[in-house]
Image (cartoon, rainbow, N blue to C red):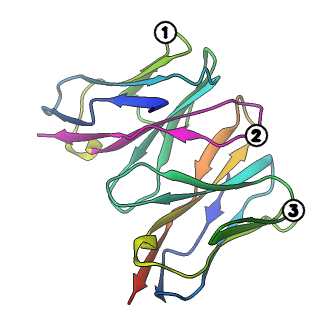
Amino acid sequence: DAMVIQNPRYQVTQFGKPVTLSCSQTLNHNVMYWYQQKSSQAPKLLFHYYDKDFNNEADTPDNFQSRRPNTSFCFLDIRSPGLGDAAMYLCATSRGNLNTEAFFGQGTRLTVV
Amino acid sequence: GQNIDQPTEMTATEGAIVQINCTYQTSGFNGLFWYQQHAGEAPTFLSYNVLDGLEEKGRFSSFLSRSKGYSYLLLKELQMKDSASYLCAAFFKAAGNKLTFGGGTRVLVKP
């Protein structure tokens, strides 16, 4: 059974129209990460939550926001998608201070038209 | 930052062995992962090293030297299905262990 679930798998949005991607987990992990991955590039960390504490990467554009209403769910909000935001968005979780692997969802492929 | 460096691309023959090297900044280092990623799919976990030494898991082995900031992934008896990107990623001590990826190494296995 999938432990980190991302919905939808494919999302098409219009240029400038706000879009929200969702991630849920059944692992009860403290940490949830959002990555952006463009074609033939490695995943780039946008931000991560340790419980409710939000940690933003210095180079993450203000256009990207996140919410974590509870342990199980985390959302990525793109306020005004541009063509350059088309990418695969990956959600991952880990236990935090315990050294175990990070578990990834299947990703959401975002297309901006 | 936490620079993680690995070669961009490698080519090998089916049945052969390939070693993918990864170097990282040692400050705040808290564990290293290798992931395999096929095109269009999410990364899948291969191995985790936190102590020095070699971890063997079937055809795949991973080595870590903390003092040198160095790891490698060894793929033995290569199969065509091993053609994929291999991502080196490290935990760095920050709130909840920040997981950062290297640029990935694309491995092409030829018959």
Question: Horizontally, is A68 left or right of A19 in the view?
Answer: right
* Residue nearest the viewer, comparing A77 with A6: A6
User: Which quarter of the rendering shows the C terminus of chain A?
Assistant: top left
Query: What amino acid is found at the position of numbered circle 2 in the picture?
Result: Asn
Query: What amino acid is found at the position of numbered circle 1 in the picture?
Result: Pro
* Residue annotated with mark 3: B52
Compared to residue B97, the image places residue B2 above or below, namely: below
Query: What amino acid is found at the position of numbered circle 3 in the picture?
Result: Asp
* Number of residues whose C-alpha sits closer than 10 Å to that of mark 3, classed few (under 14), some (14–19) or many (20 or more): few
Question: Horizontally, is A30 left or right of B15 in the view?
Answer: right
Compared to residue B98, the image places residue A48 above or below, namely: above
- The answer as to whether the residues below labels 1 and 3 share one chain is no
Query: Picture coordinates of residue B1 (x, y %)?
Result: 66, 50
Residue occupying image coordinates x 49% and y 74%: B8
* Number of residues whose C-alpha sits closer than 10 Å to that of mark 2, classed few (under 14), some (14–19) or many (20 or more): some
* Residue annotated with mark 1: A69
* Chain of the residue under label 2: A
Question: Horizontally, is B53 left or right of A104 in the view?
Answer: right
Query: Picture coordinates of residue A72 (x, y %)?
Result: 51, 16
Magenta region, residue range: A87-113
CA distance for labels 2 and 3 = 15 Å
